[in-house]
Image (cartoon, grey):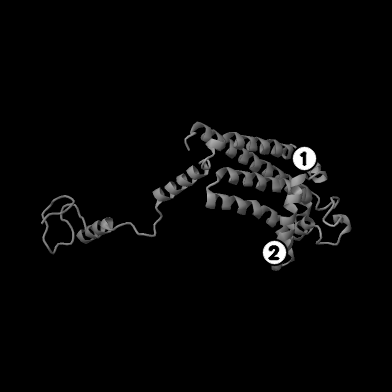
Amino acid sequence: MECPKCAHPRRVEQLTCDSCGLVFHKYESYLRRREQPVAADEPDTDSLQSRLAAGRRALMTPPQGMAGLLPLYALTWLLFVVWGWSYMVQDITSLGLDPGFLHNINLPFHEAGHVVFGLFGQFIGSLGGTLGQLLIPVVAGIALLWHRGDTFGAGLCLWWFGQNFLDIAPYMADARAGQLPLLGGNYGRSSPYGFHDWEFILGETGLLTHDQTLAAVTLNLGRGIMLLAMIWGARLLWLAWSNPRR
């Protein structure tokens, strides 16, 4: 027999090599561990990267038949770009004085959020109005992706999701002033504590003095999301135009 490291002769009962000092049973244990397969619960990095890449490809795949209706899709995209830009260029004061048509679309979902989330207490119920109007476009977008693979429609839902932030920002900024009209014709400054959502939310969390800063962050977050949705739509249009056979 020989030492597996230096090939020096060894006896069967010998524990270490006389030449290099290798401990035979430790070396044999090392060889057995090296031959064992990778545990099943260890993360498969390559597989995870493949799934992420597949997800990115799916989001950048134009809907089936988009190339055949490209002018209609392009016109729809242009409409939402112009419409979105009319919101994005406004400041918080302007958005509060004239919230626009979509405010009336968002409002029922806002009020429904109060009802649904109100089951979990006053604070969650107050926050539920905002959660309600934000969740609806998210649910709609996921449904379009999951059931139809409609990436363009999901992009429009992302646009709507961003617009909701622009709808929320003026009332967040109004938390201390209480000057904007509330549902029913009331005003924050004349209504009891808890009636104005953001006065109550920020007051209960100790952030009332930061209402203007938080509103500005919300406004710019919404602008960024709407811009991202426009870019997504433009990318899908380009891909459909460059690959008309799809």
For image coordinates 69% across by 54% down, the residue present is 133
Q: x, y (%) of residue 174?
A: 81, 50
Q: Residues within 10 Å of mark 1 (few under 14, many from 20)?
A: some
Quarter residue 190 falls in: bottom right
Nearer to me, 122 or 176: 122
Hey, what amino acid is under mark 1?
Asp
Question: In the picture provided, is 81 more to the left or to the right than 60?
Answer: right
Q: Residue furthest top?
A: 242
Q: Residues within 10 Å of mark 2 (few under 14, many from 20)?
A: some
Q: x, y (%) of residue 33?
A: 28, 58
Nearer to me, 139 or 207: 139
For image coordinates 36% across by 59% down, the residue present is 40
Q: x, y (%) of residue 81?
A: 67, 36
Q: Which mark is residue 91?
A: 1
Question: In the picture provided, is 24 more to the left or to the right than 235?
Answer: left
Q: Residue furthest right?
A: 190
For image coordinates 52% across by 44% down, the residue present is 59
Hey, what amino acid is under mark 2?
Val
Residue corresponding to mark 2: 116
Image quarter of the N terminus: bottom left
Q: Secondary structure at mark 1?
A: loop
Q: x, y (%) of residue 42?
A: 39, 57
Q: CA distance from mark 1 to mark 2?
A: 31 Å
